[in-house]
Structures are given as C-alpha cells and as structure tokens.
Image (cartoon, grey):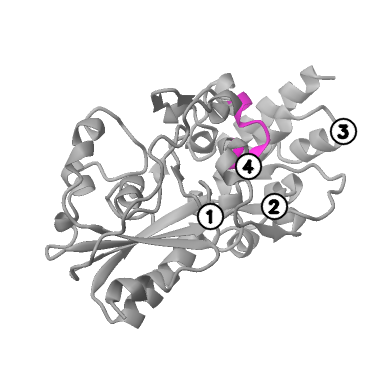
C-alpha cells in the first residue's frame, strides 16, 4: 500500500483528510498585505511559506474534524445563554492534535503539527490539500462534512502525491443565506468584516459601544448562525448532545463560578483560552439583552460590589438596561 493510501485510511466518519505540496502560498500575499486579522502571525512571509516553518518541508497533510452538534434534551426555565457548538466539550486543539500525532507516529514520518496555532492560513491549506473550497461565509465547505469542521495539519519532509480537489469551485452560486442571516452584517458579497462578527465580539477584550453589546445578544462565546443556514450542512455528520449546560450554559452558574469551577468546566474547552472574566462579561451582557425579570435583576444585584472594576461597570450598565425595560 502506498503511503498516500495509508494516510487516507485514517479518515473516519467525522473527519476528512487531504494532501498538498509545501510550496509558498504566493497567491494570497497581496490579500494579506491589505487586511488586518486578529489573533494571527503578523509576519506575512511566515503566513505564506511552509519552508520558513520547516526548512525541509515537502508536503502538507490536512485533517478536518467535524464539530457539528444538535441538542436533543429538554430545556428548563433557568436563564440561559448560547455557546458555539465549536466551543463545546474537549478543546478541538487537543482532539485534532491527538489524531495528527497518531497518524504521524503510525506512519513513522517526521513533521510539525499545527492546530489553529501555526502561521499558515488554515483555509488555504485546506483548499490546497483538496478538502474543500471557501464559501461566501468565509468557511471551507466540504461535500462530506459541510462547513462545520476544524482544520489541523502536518508539515512533513516526505514527498507525497497531492490530493485532487474534486470540489465545485463555485459552491455557493446564487445562494446568499449566510449573508442574509448574519445579524451583524459582517458577511459581505466580496469579503468579511471581522470587526462586526459576533464570534469575534465575544472574544474581544473591550466592548465599548452599545451596538457591540446588543449584537452579542445571548451569546456567551462564538456564533453559529451562518453555519446553521448553510445548505451544505444538511444531511452531514452530526453528534447528538443531551447535556443542557453544555449547549445552553446557565448564566447564574457562569457568574458565580470559582476559579476551580472554571478550570473544571471551561478551561479545557475552546473558549477557555479567553479566561473566566470574558465569559462572565458576556453573561452579564446576555442578561441585559434579555427580557426584564426579577431573577435576572437579582443575579446582577449580587454582583454590584464586585472588586473587578470592569466587571462592576458591566453589571451596573446591565442593571440600568433591565430597569429601563420594566
């Protein structure tokens, strides 16, 4: 069996695997020079040249892991927020890295593994490795997994035959469901305004404007709206989740959790890297964006004397917002 066939044999029901060469991604240099993207490597040469990461790089092995989930339990009358399905359960960085480590060790090849931590543009890696094309939402779309999957890759010194990309280039055609559904208007016909993306706003350190706080709505972390309306995400792999707190987190629990409880509940999830304070801030904003209720007001009243000045500021603002709704 050829090495490429062995690599493809690791593909499972919830994963896709592809191979690409390690030549520079010169085609996107002019694009990267014009945009300012958060949370990424600022050296553009490192973002486009695999050989600056690994000098002897010859090939890239890409893995896509589905995070598509649906809630199948019962909802109670607690005040709850929403969390992105990608932030539920064990951090995808850990899951994908383990899978890539297993592939690398099983094949006995040398390589460097990256899961949302390397300088290369993940979507471009995925395209080159034949596991999808970029849709209007900016997400990579794959025939098997839709657009709801994370990407990791191995940069290796082994010469491998690239995967033939059989995906349709004009995937979206006249469809603009994601553009219409995006509450913030961050998805554009010819681009993406990340500064208005709800997922970005839930991770942003400061939310100074009323508009930003309103856009978050009840999101504690991330956003799935553009994913939910995408036709390619119908009839794909999906995991059923019955854990209510995982899918719709209890806001009071978030606001009263200790550091130890945060470590146990969120630290090892994809939203844990932003820390407890950001999640609590978003939970406070979620209360302010909800309907007025004595329960919501009581939760906030208990936090009026929080020693953290920034959190106290959001609490007092949220109390005023709720009282205005009486």
Res 196 label: none
Cα gap from disc 2 to disc 3, whole angstroms: 31 Å
**Disc 3 marks which residue?**
294
Q: Where is the N terminus found, in terms of image quarters? A: bottom left
**Disc 1 marks which residue?**
272
The reply to whether the magenta stretch includes residue 219 is: yes
* Viewer-side label of 4, 2: 2
Res 70 label: 2
What secondary structure is marked by label 3?
Answer: helix
The reply to whether the magenta stretch includes residue 2 is: no
Residues at discs 3 and 1 in contact (Cβ within 8 Å) = no
Q: Which numbered disc, 1 or 4, marks the residue that appears first in the sequence?
A: 4
- Kindly identify the residue that appears in the image at 30 percent across and 71 percent down: 4
What secondary structure is marked by label 1?
Answer: helix
Task: Provide residue 90's location: percent of width, then percent of height.
Answer: 56, 63
Task: Provide residue 76's location: percent of width, then percent of height.
Answer: 86, 48
Cα gap from disc 4 to disc 2, whole angstroms: 17 Å
What secondary structure is marked by label 2?
Answer: strand
Q: Which residues are magenta?
A: 213-225
């Amino acid at each position: 069996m050829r090495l490429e066939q062995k690599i493809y044999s690791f593909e499972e029901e919830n994963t896709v695997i592809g191979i690409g060469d390690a030549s520079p991604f010169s085609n996107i240099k002019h694009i990267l020079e014009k945009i300012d993207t958060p949370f990424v490597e600022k050296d553009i040469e490192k973002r486009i040249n695999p050989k600056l990461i690994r000098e002897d790089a010859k090939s890239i092995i890409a893995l896509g892991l589905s995070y598509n989930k649906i809630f199948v339990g019962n909802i109670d009358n607690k005040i709850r927020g929403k969390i992105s399905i990608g932030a539920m359960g064990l951090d995808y960085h850990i899951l994908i890295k383990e899978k890539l480590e297993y592939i690398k060790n099983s094949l006995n090849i040398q390589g460097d593994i990256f899961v949302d931590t390397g300088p290369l543009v993940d979507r471009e890696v995925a395209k080159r490795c034949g596991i999808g094309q970029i849709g209007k939402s900016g997400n990579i779309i794959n025939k098997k997994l839709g657009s709801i999957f994370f990407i990791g890759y191995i940069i290796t010194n082994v010469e491998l035959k690239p995967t033939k990309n059989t995906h349709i280039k004009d995937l979206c055609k006249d469809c603009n469901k994601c553009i219409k559904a995006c509450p913030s208007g961050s998805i554009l016909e010819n681009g993406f305004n990340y500064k208005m993306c709800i997922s970005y706003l839930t991770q942003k350190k400061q939310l100074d404007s009323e508009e930003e706080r309103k856009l978050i709505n009840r999101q504690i972390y991330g956003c799935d709206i553009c994913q939910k309306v995408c036709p390619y995400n119908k009839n794909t792999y999906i995991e059923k989740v019955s854990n209510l707190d995982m899918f719709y987190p209890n806001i009071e629990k978030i606001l009263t959790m200790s550091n130890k409880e945060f470590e146990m509940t969120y630290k090892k999830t994809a939203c844990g890297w932003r820390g407890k304070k950001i999640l609590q801030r978003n939970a406070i904003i979620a209360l302010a964006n909800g309907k007025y209720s004595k329960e919501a007001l009581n939760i906030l009243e208990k936090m009026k004397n929080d020693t953290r000045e920034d959190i106290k500021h959001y609490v007092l603002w949220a109390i005023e917002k709720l009282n205005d709704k009486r």
